[in-house]
Image (cartoon, rainbow, N blue to C red):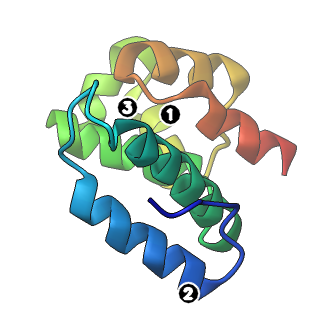
């Protein structure tokens, strides 16, 4: 069994991916289970550093979640306000306030971090 270290190069990363692919379906108790867990952690760390995924735009996250749930703008009115106010938010003409972000987080299940990261940046 190879001794694994922090993945520093694309070659290290490729080797780790290839090895994990070989042993991916091992069950707990299998001699290769710990190696698979370790590779998963090493690969994840490498990907976070070299292939970061930026936070989605809050407005795009709202629209995506609405699409996933099959919601129309009128479905947000009971939570947010009038038709024109919802429309202004969804068209980017009005900001998503902290109160609205909280409601969208609770009612649509959008992670609060999506709204917070946008406010911080």
Secondary structure beneath disc 3?
helix
Answer with the quarter of the image where residue 95 lies.
top right
What number is the disc on residue 83?
Answer: 3
- Give the residue at x 19% y 33%: 69
Precedes in sequence: disc 3 or disc 2 = 2
| Residue hosting label 1 | 85
Tag of residue 104: none
Whether residue 2 is visible to the viewer of this picture, yes or no, is: yes
Residue in front for this viewpoint, 27 or 68: 27
Residue appearing at x 70%, y 61% in the figure: 6
Give percent across and percent down for residue 65: 32, 39
Q: Quadrant of residue 49?
A: bottom right
Left/right of residue 16 with respect to residue 92 in the rendered view: left
Disc 1, SS: helix
In the picture, the disc for residue 11 is: 2
Q: Residue drawn 54% across and 54% down?
A: 44
């Amino acid at each position: 069994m190879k001794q694994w270290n922090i993945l520093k190069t694309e070659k290290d990363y490729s080797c780790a991916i290839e090895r994990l692919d070989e042993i991916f379906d091992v069950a707990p108790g299998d001699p290769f289970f710990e190696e698979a867990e370790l590779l998963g952690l090493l690969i994840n760390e490498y990907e976070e550093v070299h292939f970061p995924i930026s936070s989605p735009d809050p407005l795009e996250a709202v629209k995506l979640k609405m699409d996933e749930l099959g919601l129309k703008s009128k479905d947000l009115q009971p939570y947010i306000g009038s038709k024109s106010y919802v429309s202004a938010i969804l068209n980017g003409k009005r900001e998503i306030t902290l109160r609205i972000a909280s409601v969208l987080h609770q009612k649509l299940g959008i992670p609060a971090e999506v709204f917070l990261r946008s406010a911080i940046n």
